[in-house]
Amino acid sequence: MANSASGLQSLPPLQRVLVVGSGGREHSLGWALSRCPGIEQVWVSPGNGGIPERTEGQTQTFSKLPLSEGDRDGLLQHCRSASVDLVVVGPEAPLAAGLADHLRAAGLAVFGPGADGAQLEASKAWAKQLMDEAGIPTAGHWAISSANEGLALLEQLQRPLVVKADGLAAGKGVTVATSVTDTASAIREAFGGRFGSAGDRVVLEECLQGPEVSIFALSDGERMVILPPAQDHKRLLEGDAGPNTGGMGAYAPAPLLDAEGLETVRRQILEPTLQALRDREIDYRGVIYAGLMLTANGPQVIEFNCRFGDPECQTLMPLMGPQLAQVLQACAIGRLDLAPALTIRSDCSVCVVVAAAGYPDAPRKGDPITSQLEAGASHQLFHAGTRLNEQGILVSSGGRVLTMSAQGSDFDQAFAAAYEALAKVTFEGMQYRRDIGHQVRRA
Ligand code: AMP
Ligand code: GLY
């Protein structure tokens, strides 16, 4: 398996896949994988209220398992007893905690980096050092370990800075300050325990300007396949106002980067990153997610993540060709050279996230969700924070509740399809942005 892949002439059989996670990202990954030819069964664990339970005696290709992301031994046991051929780990926390290492050590093919590679996301200071050493364009920065150190630096620089908790803070560890006073407050706050141990160290950065774009490279440790650029919408409210969120909607391919621009990103950012990982003897098998800002001086890295973006994944999965499962498997065993070329539909794909009342600060849970939606070829409803309650009623159970994805021959058509479908889904207090994709819509 993973450890004896070097002499292989073709990919091993691939029928059963386990996706670890419970969000819209994992729902869309499981959905896309279950549509690949030859795939008999996809489990998503722990999944969500939109993924069916497996019923005894029935053959279902797509179902959930009740094992949490942290239940390494339970997941391993399932992989063994159900002869799982490929594990795809969705979120960053289990990757940073070494889930991929644990499963790989037992001989499984795992798509997702080990804890060493996951530092790309789990430690901003580590990632920054790697970028500096590899000459990867990124904002100027300073790693500081006390508020006083940061305040002294600020005193010298006398300009607003971006303040980032070093560790994983679920996308909430960043303040883009607009004044020196705000920067000082953010530094004090970051060391004040707000981010737990993620805030023991803080990175200060120069503030960059330009549109943001998310790039995903599927890597086998040596080679990579780059997916179409996607653009997320981080702010809660229309007009890109309000607090930062995990992401409120996305579209792809984002015209911000054409083929030439993408080639520059490959050459200046992705290839050097993979090389720098290899130089550290890190065999990175999974997604390198580069969050870029397209500045007047070219693309610069804002952050790296070690997984697919959520909700970007929900726009990209519907575009993936039938080779997706084999491509992820080939990455997992370090043999992308054995995979068929991944075809990507040329459609425009979009998604709109529906969040609960009170999101992002205090999302309300337990609101019943009703839907008059009929299955359609041009839209997909991916669940995230949903569950079936004791009465079997679908209710909200988290901040980001649903993602509606849709495709069309242009962005106007795709967004019209997404919003039309979304009008058929309701729950009390639901909130979503009507202006997702304002950058590319004419209507
Ligand atoms: P991160 O969690 O690192 O992705 O940061 C969250 C958001 O903060 C990014 O999506 C950007 O909008 C913003 N941001 C982060 N770093 C910078 C920077 N150096 N300059 C300007 N904006 C930034
Ligand atoms: N959509 C942003 C993220 O997944 O981090």
Image (cartoon, helix red, strand yellow):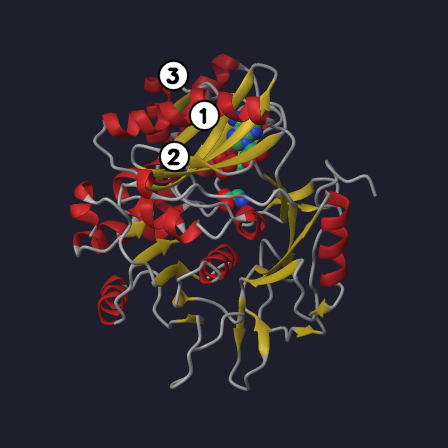
Residue 135: which disc? 3
The amino acid sitting under disc 2 is Met
User: In this orientation, does residue 111 appear?
Assistant: yes
Residue 26 in the image: above or below residue 297:
below
Element type at marker 3? Answer: loop
Q: Earlier in the sequence, mark 1 or mark 3?
A: 3
Q: Give left or right: position of 103 versus 22.
A: left
Element type at marker 2? Answer: strand
Q: State which mark lies toward you, 2 or 3.
A: 2
Q: Earlier in the sequence, mark 2 or mark 3?
A: 3
The amino acid sitting under disc 3 is Gly
The residue located at (40%, 65%) in the rendering is: 42
Q: Which residue is mark 2?
A: 224
The residue located at (55%, 86%) in the rendering is: 391
180 or 436: nearer the viewer: 436
Residue 100 in the image: above or below residue 389:
above
The amino acid sitting under disc 1 is Arg
443 or 375: nearer the viewer: 375
- Within 8 Å: ligand 1 and the Cβ of disc 1? no
Q: CA distance from mark 1 to mark 3?
A: 14 Å
Q: Which residue is mark 1?
A: 266
User: Could you tell me residue 64's position as x and y percent?
Assistant: 42, 71
User: Could you tell me residue 10's position as x and y percent?
Assistant: 27, 47
User: In this orientation, does residue 185 appear?
Assistant: no
- Within 8 Å: ligand 2 and the Cβ of disc 2? no
The residue located at (23%, 28%) in the rendering is: 280
Mark 3, Cα crowd under 10 Å, few <14 / some 14-19 / many 20+, is some
415 or 160: nearer the viewer: 415
Q: CA distance from mark 2 to mark 3?
A: 20 Å
Residue 437 in the image: above or below residue 46:
above
